[in-house]
Amino acid sequence: MTASSVEQLRKEGNELFKCGDYEGALAAYTQALGLGAAPQDQAVLHRNRAACHLKLEDYSKAEMEATKAIEKDGGDVKALYRRSQALEKLGRLDHAVLDLQRCVSLEPKNKVFQEALRNIGGQIQEKVRYMSSTDAKVEQMFQILLDPEEKGTEKKQKASQNLVVLAREDAGAEKIFQSNGVQLLQRLLDTGETDLMLAALRTLVGICSEHQSRTVATLSVLGTRRVVSFLGVDSQAVSLAACHLLQVMFDALKEGVKKGFRGKEGAIIVDPARELKVLISNLLELLAEVGVSGQGRDNALTLLIKMVPRKSPKDPNNSLTLWVIDQGLKKILEVGGSVQAPPGELAVTANSRMSASILLSKLFDDLQCDAERENFHRLCENCIRSWFEGQGLPGKLRAIQTVSCLLQGPSEAGNRVLELSGVMESVIALCASEQEEEQLVAVEALIHAAGKAKRASFITANGVSLLKDLYKRSEKDSIRIRALVGLCKLGSAGGTDFSMKQFAEGSTLKLAKQCRKWLCNDQIDAGTRRWAVEGLAYLTFDADVKEEFVEDEAALKALFQLGRSEERSVLFAVASALVNCTNSYDYEEPDPKMVELAKYAKQHVPEQHPKDKPSFVRARVKKLLAVGVVSALTCMVKTESPVLTNSCRELLSRVFLALVEEVEDRGTVVAQGGGKALLPLALEGTDVGQTKAAQALAKLTITSNPEMTFPGERIYEVVRPLVSLLHLSCSGLQNFEALMALTNLAGISERLRNDTCTCTMQVTYSMCPGQDKYSNARKLASSPAWSPTSYFRAFPGSPAPSWACCMAGNHCSSYWCGRVLAP
């Protein structure tokens, strides 16, 4: 029975492999191996697994599986040939040629083996010529760069550019490394000249990229502390280059060697976990150093955000997060609690505290149990208590600033520390201080503390009068605008519920008018105007405010300009305001019977504002498009900053979906670059955000020429987001729109048709019910209702499948519909 089961699974794997479902075939072969197959069968199964890995472009695993097959059967020519293919892709041509020579000796008349051997021989000769010709070039470039007489010459600039270009290729990076390049690059870094330091750092990026052993050797020569210290220099360009280098080093240490050479440097034995901790430990130390530039501190926070938290909740190992919390939480809180201006304080930028909040939030979200979260709370409380109780007024200011940082990040931790004895009382007291700096810290804390409904009601009862007094009497715009935002936040505590009004009729409109006035004032710095956007983000829950806001063209243009500016901390507020204006948040019509039941029970029933009806929403979308909202959103998507969080991406996806809802608006969105901006949103972010972006892509693909909407190679990137909508968790409309969009794509070219077929087959297989997924996959694939083969069977000369018009009927909105004759 075991032998029969193994044979059956092997055949099923072969069938799936022929259909292009390489992952399914791999699973079948793996299951067969688990049944205890005979040695000869094991060799065949390992050989077949190698073929799957080759198709999936995982060449390291392909080499490993082929090696296992050869260990079982040394004369298996197929296994030898597949290992040679994997070794060739990995760049290990000297080993690949040995396997091919063995294949030719076993089957001398096999023309495939003979041709492969000739090709790889040519590659080896080319590689030898390239390596030998670059030896002299590398030496000459370093001589020019290190020659003091060549200072500032065009020759020196060209040499540095050539060195960077050479390091981008694996062979060139290896040649630089073997030519004592790291020590020579260290001498370039020691010069202190910006141009030479940039050239050295960018060359090191090429040397360390995806190569673990070279990375460890580089850190050993330069010193981890020295490499990290380049983040803190005053030159912004050097700091960014060092940030890129450290990111590459981290990826190399974490992922190991994906490609590269296996020479003497490959014999270095390292403990990646130890090297990672040394690297992260130095980054944490950098956060608390006084002499570090604000830009360098921001770059260090960005690296920690990318490096520390787990990429997926499915990964059970969060030990790195726990270690960072134990070793560096206080240092992160020091950045979050920093107060600008006083000498001796940490240098920070306008984005530093927001970056610290995001890092704290990601660390807290990465915790897995109550005990870990309780430890986080305890460390935060101890840190704030030590500042609050033992360092006088400066300590209190730092503690309150840290509370604000926590409230913007892990709000649960922020609310816990806000309840410590004396904290809230100090916030209220400092709001009345005569010192602007103290007032700023206290008012911001009061604003962030009003985030929860329970605390908002407390502040409404105890702090509204204080905020109104600050707004009316303060002579500083920076204080008045923050007090105004506090009033805006309290006034919007009811959200979109029309029946819950916190303030008197017309008060929110007055607040919104003042926010728009400050937003349009170019004389105010961007950091202060950001608070006006924060206020509008809260007030636009009110439909009356939305209507007035979209009528104010100057305010909309000022909002979009601020979204494009370097003030990155404003992105979430801009996105929130646009989500509110377009009503792109989730809303479900309440069941009338449940409404009647709630009224009978005297329970509160939320009411929708009359101006939030679809006709008003469509009119607001038209006005936003006319002012240029799409180009602003496109710039926001391109932002490379930790402030562009997954939640922010989701908000942008929601706005895009609202903008393409009407067919006549889609051309405007495409013309202003909306199609290009949607691709990264559909590939990264929350599940909801990716689905919204994919649906927006589907709507654009249905009603426009895909070749114009997604020019060049970008059109092939659209397939996978569209196929992701063909899932049982998506709605029927999303399924339908995805199929229509894929139909248009399939009519473009044979390559697109094949890509669409392959991706759809994989999704079809993943949705198969029952225990015998392999046979069910075949049944689904062969059924007329699901088979991509039958879907994409077009008439000769037709640019799109004939079934599209059958399914869509006479009222199809597909771009290709007019060109296809329905059967």
Image: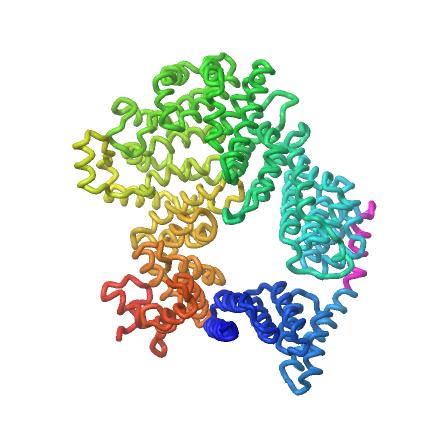
Magenta region, main secondary structure? helix
Is residue 137 shown in magenta? yes
Q: Position of residue 401 (x, y in %)?
A: 52, 24
Does residue 392 appear in this view? yes
- In this picture, is 671 found above or below 616? below
Q: Position of residue 337 (x, y in %)?
A: 56, 25
Q: Position of residue 662 (x, y in %)?
A: 29, 52
Given residues 670 and 250, the one toward you in this image is 250
Find residue 171 and report its image quarter: bottom right
Find residue 756 and report its image quarter: bottom left
Locate residue 680 relative to residue 662 in the image: left or right. right
Extreme residue in the front direction: 1
- In this picture, is 792 found above or below 358? below
Is residue 488 shown in magenta? no
Q: Position of residue 439 (x, y in %)?
A: 49, 17
Q: Which residues are magenta?
A: 133-149
Image point 61% across, 37% down: which residue?
324
Image point 30% across, 24% down: which residue?
502
Given residues 803 and 480, the one toward you in this image is 803
Does residue 118 appear in this view? no
- In this picture, is 1 found above or below 603? below
Find residue 121 and report its image quarter: bottom right
